[in-house]
Image (cartoon, coloured by chain):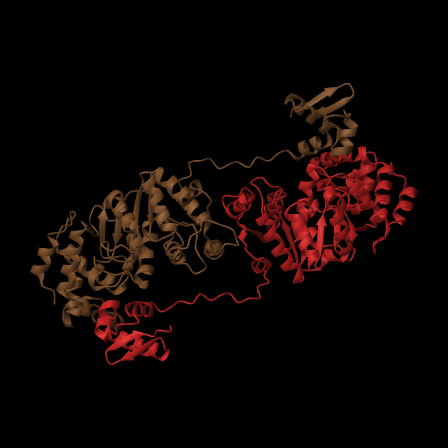
Chain colours: A brown, B red
Amino acid sequence: MIDDREVVHAASALRAGEAGASTEAIARATWSVLAEPGDGVAGSLIRELGAAGALELALDAPSPADGRVDGSARAHRALAEGRARWRPRAQTRALVDALHGASQVGARLVIPGDPDWPDSLDDLGEHAPPALWVRGDARLLRATPRVAIVGARAATGYGEHIAAEIAGDLAAGGATVVSGGAYGIDGVAHRAALGVRGATIAFLAGGVDRAYPSGHQELFTRIAGHGAVVSELPCGAAPTKWRFLARNRLIAALGQATVVVEAGWRSGSLNTAGHAAALGRPLGAVPGPVTSAASAGCHRLLREYDARCVTCAAEVRELWGDDTQEASASRRQDPDRTRLLDALGTRTPLDVMEICRRSGLAPDRVRALLGLLDLEGILTRSDAGWVRAANR
Amino acid sequence: MIDDREVVHAASALRAGEAGASTEAIARATWSVLAEPGDGVAGSLIRELGAAGALELALDAPSPADGRVDGSARAHRALAEGRARWRPRAQTRALVDALHGASQVGARLVIPGDPDWPDSLDDLGEHAPPALWVRGDARLLRATPRVAIVGARAATGYGEHIAAEIAGDLAAGGATVVSGGAYGIDGVAHRAALGVRGATIAFLAGGVDRAYPSGHQELFTRIAGHGAVVSELPCGAAPTKWRFLARNRLIAALGQATVVVEAGWRSGSLNTAGHAAALGRPLGAVPGPVTSAASAGCHRLLREYDARCVTCAAEVRELWGDDTQEASASRRQDPDRTRLLDALGTRTPLDVMEICRRSGLAPDRVRALLGLLDLEGILTRSDAGWVRAANR
């Protein structure tokens, strides 16, 4: 169903990485055309047989060779269903278009085994993407630390302010800001990273040759120039609701931590947060006014997802254990000291027994504390008794 | 050192509860004069010997009778230090003044064993108060549920708004709002409870005959009239920094849950929250803008004290397990359904194979889903194919 010569010709136009236009790379590119994001049957087949072997099995007519997959009835049914999903898309035209589209925008294919392949995506198991299409600097996919900063499209001025502060601070400190390229928080996070000449990655829900939202066309061009615009979908693919949801798992998996800045009660950002939590990635949420609908999702994350409350970039760094500041030791004052100081004024001198009565402390204890506080210059002594030093 | 006849005479002026002017009640009143709040040595003695026996031991000259307390050297030293603290205050005048002060404002003494004594204070162990002085309706001390709502004196309009909403809602629902009578959040919480003719208790750090802050004189009069103003300190006692800190443990112990609405980074409300946490009481914190210093303490509670994020009265009720609303079951949509709907528009009819290509679903699956969605009226079918129903 796929004409190999035509595909190899188109693939050679790709600015390919080390994996180049190998059989494996072409097979993975083909899988990105055939299977919807997160197709676990495709993922399992690829893991067992390699992408090329899996493709052969997928597009062949059913045969005894199917015995190559684990022989349970369930696995056979899953394969049959997979075949039924993939075959309608198995057209040379679709693959060639994807390859041409990629070469036109200078996108390259990154696949497992490529030095730039981010191993953290392997945590997605059979739901890991077969390949990534990358416009820009693919090396960023492995640069560390990487932090996902996501949030509501309908962000408020408050949310945008905080997103810019946090993303800018983190990017200036060397972190790569990963987000989804949407209006609102995502866009602010990308821009803040670019603004400090920091690194940023935008994961799109359609092909990297398509600007969605179209108002971010120029932003994506800037990100591709200084960072990376990435998708698991081939060029030409339109973003769909499903693909947005699936894309969110890549943001969560690539980030070493995920922070949600603002999110409505049913925001897509909660989906990203849920993926991060499921992957065991640290999850942070920025609180806001409880009167703000744009913060309701963040408060939900704090309540229901055990997200950590983060209010600044330093607290986000703590999420991945980069806690360079010393934990502020909670200094406990001596309570007797407080009681003695409560008893004293700056005007009327008091004798020891009066201080005892007022403070409820024993004379010995009072004398000992008076001595210490005198040394510290906190008290002054006269013949009439003790007073607090006026300048303290 | 204490003249019994004069004290009994003064005590008879008290509008006493069932415990009345018993020896035990007078002894506990005396302890409230002698010992500073939270004096653990006094508390231990009272627990072992009863208040009267403990008082006798405390004010006698050291003797072999000291053997009545557990005989370790440490216990003896603690007793000796206690005696040295208490004796400077053991003056008949002080106790008589306290009793007269109480009778003047109509305060009564509530002690353990009294039907109104709140057992929840016993959780404070040796740091429980020997007695409470109460102006108003002492029965509220045992009414349930009781929720502590505290926060910053320097509250913002936002914090005051939320405190009023939450306290008013809870009080209207029958909860008793416990707070500290301070400016800011405390005052708003009391007022909101009074405003819905609900119950409220103010714990003061000085005697219940003293309005501190003085600007809340009228508020305390209203609370005494419709709720209760309570202190462990005798009438005439001035509030001190130490007594504010000690008072906070009573608020935390009386509340079945504690909620902090706004708090600065070093707010006294964090002290109350710390007591609640130490006592195993559920602790809630209301988030706010991370740009607001008045919410910094609340965010700290979320981060460092494992406080639960609460944004409304219903979420506060959940703190003590009064969750009358069903947990919103997170409805998971069938992902295939989403993918199929993504593939369809409202204008151009598509045939099954085209829907398969666009959605990445198998023909059988597409046909099954089309049937279901048709039944639900979400799709319409024509000879040319399927479209989404325009009105959905």
On the image, the x and y values in percent for residue A129 come to 25, 57
Q: Residue at x 24, y 81 (%)?
A: B383
On the image, the x and y values in percent for residue B6 come to 91, 42
Whether B317 is drawn above or below A110: the answer is below
Q: Is residue B294 left or right of residue B73?
A: left
Q: Residue furthest top?
A: A383
Q: Quadrant of the C terminus of chain A?
A: top right
Judging depth in this view, the residue of B176 and B159 nearest the camera is B159
Judging depth in this view, the residue of A123 and B194 nearest the camera is B194
Q: Residue furthest left?
A: A5
Q: Is residue B16 left or right of residue A340?
A: right
Q: Could you tell me if residue A147 is visible in this image?
A: no
Q: Is residue A151 left or right of residue B267?
A: left
Q: Could you tell me if residue A15 is visible in this image?
A: yes
Q: Quadrant of the N terminus of chain A?
A: bottom left
Q: Is residue A7 left or right of residue B293?
A: left
Counting every numbered tag in the picture gives 0
On the image, the x and y values in percent for residue B367 come to 27, 77
Whether A69 is drawn above or below A125: the answer is below
Q: Residue at x 27, y 63 (%)?
A: A40
Quadrant hosting residue A130: bottom left
Quadrant hosting residue A24: bottom left
On the image, the x and y values in percent for residue A88 come to 19, 70
